[in-house]
Amino acid sequence: MKTITLTLKEFSSIALEFDELRPDDVYTWTKEDFEKYQVPVGNSKFPLSNYFDIEVEGEAEGPEEVKMILNGDMGRVKYIGCGMTAGEILVDGDADLHAGAQMEGGSIKINGNAESYVGREMTGGSIEVMGNVKEYCGTSYIGEWRGMSGGIINIHGNAGKQLADCMSGGEIYVGGSCDILAGIHMTKGYIEIGGDVTRWPGGQMKNGTIVIKGKLDSLLEGFESEGVFENPDLDGKQLTGKYIKYNGDIGVNGKGTLWLNAEKNRDLL
């Protein structure tokens, strides 16, 4: 097992880009390799050692035997774990844009908040964010129609707008509340939101499942109620309590399901 620890010593107001510092790429690197590496910073490159104290312990025969620990405020470090297929990354602080984007395997844990596009277009692996995420978590990127298709994202805090835009597989769990248009253009997958949702979840969804355990402020007209169900079982995922089941979005002949906590949404009964 190899443990790579990067401890922030110099914060950069211009974002550093870490898409080349994945377990897939660095499992053979020594401390000297990291110290020689030039990290992209805006339009330039500078030695990684200008910004981090570097420790490397142990050896690895493959990326699955690598644990990367990023200590400090990574709020200006982009692309953490982007495209990784194996291994483990622990961020002991905040993370900037595109953490876990296009991820295929392995795990990322962020012990703070994360910026936009967490898990963008991911196909496998797991991401856990102990704080909040901003908009477009688990979505497609600009100009694309393929969002998250596999893996698991677990957010302990709140999520911003357009969570899981164009989602076609995988699972997302939000412990807190969520902004507008969660699951828009969704074709497959599972979203569970523990808190409240502002407006319009599931817009133009064709398939998949969205569960809202809190209060929904505004429901789209494209959803038809099928009734109230107690302790429903959603393909092995057991919900506790009474839930209103909706089908939609009928505006696109969708066959998705939206489940709302009946107690929290009495106004819709």
Image (cartoon, helix red, strand yellow):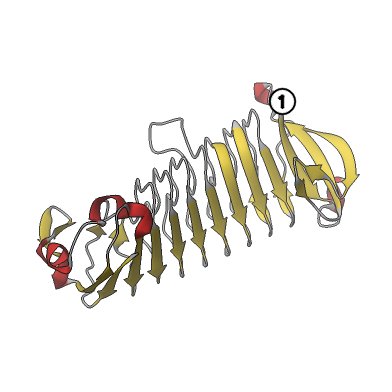
Front residue (pair 65, 251): 65
- So how many labels did they put on this image? 1
**At 56% from the left edge and 59% from the top edge, which residue is drawn?**
155
Front residue (pair 21, 64): 64
Residue 173 pos. (x, y %): 61, 54
**At 24% from the left edge and 56% from the top edge, which residue is drawn?**
26
Quadrant housing the C terminus: top right
Residue 116 pos. (x, y %): 42, 53
**At 44% from the left edge and 38% from the top edge, which residue is drawn?**
140
Q: Residue furthest top?
A: 253
Residue 182 visible: yes
Quadrant housing the N terminus: bottom left
Instruction: Describe residue 137's horizontal placement relative to residue 76 as left or right.
Output: right
Task: Check the image and report above or below for 56 versus 231.
Answer: below
Task: Check the image and report above or below for 69 versus 265.
Answer: below
Front residue (pair 165, 233): 233
Task: Check the image and report above or below for 223 versus 99.
Answer: above
Q: Quadrant of residue 65?
A: bottom left
Instruction: Describe residue 128's horizontal placement relative to residue 261 as left or right.
Output: left
**At 72% from the left edge and 42% from the top edge, which residue is drawn?**
219
Residue 261 pos. (x, y %): 80, 52
Secondary structure type for disc 1: helix
Q: Which residue is mark 1?
A: 250
Classed neighbour count for the residue bearing mark 1: other residues with Cα under 10 Å, few (<14), some (14–19), many (≥20): some
Name the kind of residue labelled 1 in the image.
Ile
Residue 181 visible: no
